[in-house]
């Protein structure tokens, strides 16, 4: 649903929309204010299957109150957190974990993969990642910026819901092995546990910036993507618009 400046209802923004704003405010404005979304990417069905299997695997240990072998291998003193709201928190499309930021009337939501708990009673936010690369991230320094922001937003949401949250979250990173002699109907993965200790101090100022952008009528300029060159989506729209203008007006370039 597109944002209406006159509406008094809380405006829902997902974790991914906050990430979109940090990538390109112009794309975020077109999406959130007018409902003009970026072209969708193909569904990564294999990734989704790995996520689902990991959830089932950790849920077995959640039910038993036992330590998963991956956590034992890395010496992490934690077990999967048992809570009857877990499925709700995982449901990013319908609910997720939410928080109403009252100064802006923006309802922030996100769907998590998993939550663990340590002996100190701190919740550990966990995200599953599945891919197949010759070399994927293996340390905190290797993590993509989008991964970092994702973890920090989830931690912020749980803190705002008055949970005690460990400053360190973890990525369960499953990297498909492509160097086997044959497929034989199965794909094997190297599973790594990558810690990440971040900071969520940027999130609230970003929410204020999003609200200020949405209340205005000025579309952010092309090429305002944070952290690098011009946004490829904005560049495409600009070039397509110029070509169509020439086509419809019969002008020479």
Image (spheres, grey):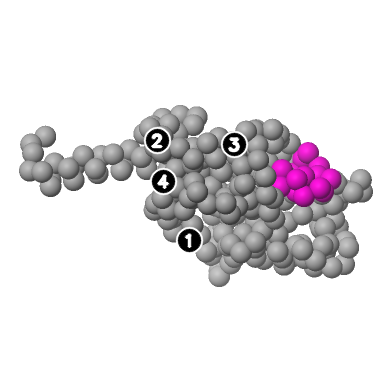
Label 2 to label 3, Cα distance in Å?
Answer: 16 Å
Label 2 to label 1, Cα distance in Å?
Answer: 33 Å
User: Does the image show residue 140?
Assistant: no
The disc, 3 or 1, on the residue closer to the chain's N-terminal end is 1
In the figure, 192 relative to 24: above or below?
Answer: below
Q: Which residue occupies 62% across, 33% down?
A: 205
Magenta stretch contains residue 148: no
Kindly state the secondary structure of the residue where label 1 is placed.
loop
Dots 4, 1 in contact, CB < 8 A: no
The disc, 2 or 1, on the residue closer to the chain's N-terminal end is 1
Viewer-nearest of discs 3 and 1: 3
Q: Which residue occupies 61% across, 47% down?
A: 106
Label 3 to label 4, Cα distance in Å?
Answer: 18 Å
- Point out residue 86 in the picture as x, y percentages from the top left corner: 75, 62
Residue 30 circle label: 4
Q: Which residue occupies 55% across, 40% down?
A: 211
- Point out residue 107 in the picture as x, y percentages from the top left corner: 63, 50
- Please state if 70 lies on the left or on the right of 140 as rendered: right
Dots 2, 4 in contact, CB < 8 A: no
Magenta stretch contains residue 162: yes
Kindly state the secondary structure of the residue where label 4 is placed.
helix
User: Does the image show residue 66?
Assistant: yes
Q: Write down the residue under mark 2.
A: 218
The disc, 4 or 1, on the residue closer to the chain's N-terminal end is 4
The disc, 2 or 3, on the residue closer to the chain's N-terminal end is 3
Q: Write down the residue under mark 1.
A: 43
């Amino acid at each position: 649903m597109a944002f209406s400046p006159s509406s008094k209802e809380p405006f829902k923004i997902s974790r991914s929309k906050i990430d979109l704003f940090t990538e390109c405010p112009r794309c975020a404005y077109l999406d959130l204010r007018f409902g003009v979304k970026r072209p969708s990417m193909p569904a990564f069905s294999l990734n989704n299957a790995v996520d689902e299997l990991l959830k089932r695997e950790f849920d077995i240990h959640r039910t038993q109150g036992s330590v998963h072998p991956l956590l034992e291998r890395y010496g992490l003193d934690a077990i999967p957190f048992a809570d009857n709201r877990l499925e709700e928190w995982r449901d990013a499309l319908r609910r997720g974990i939410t928080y109403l930021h009252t100064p802006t009337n923006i309802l922030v939501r996100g769907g998590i993969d998993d939550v663990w708990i340590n002996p100190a009673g701190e919740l550990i936010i966990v995200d599953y990642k599945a891919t197949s690369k010759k070399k994927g991230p293996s340390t905190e320094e290797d993590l993509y910026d989008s991964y970092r922001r994702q973890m920090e937003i989830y931690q912020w949401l749980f803190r705002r819901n008055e949970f005690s949250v460990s400053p360190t979250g973890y990525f369960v990173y499953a990297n498909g092995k492509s160097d086997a002699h044959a497929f034989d109907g199965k794909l094997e993965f190297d599973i790594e546990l990558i810690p990440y200790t971040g900071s969520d101090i940027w999130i609230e100022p970003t929410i204020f910036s999003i609200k200020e952008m949405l209340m205005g009528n000025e579309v952010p300029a092309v090429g305002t993507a944070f952290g690098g060159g011009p946004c490829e989506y904005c560049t495409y729209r600009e070039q397509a618009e110029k070509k169509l203008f020439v086509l419809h007006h019969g002008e020479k370039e």
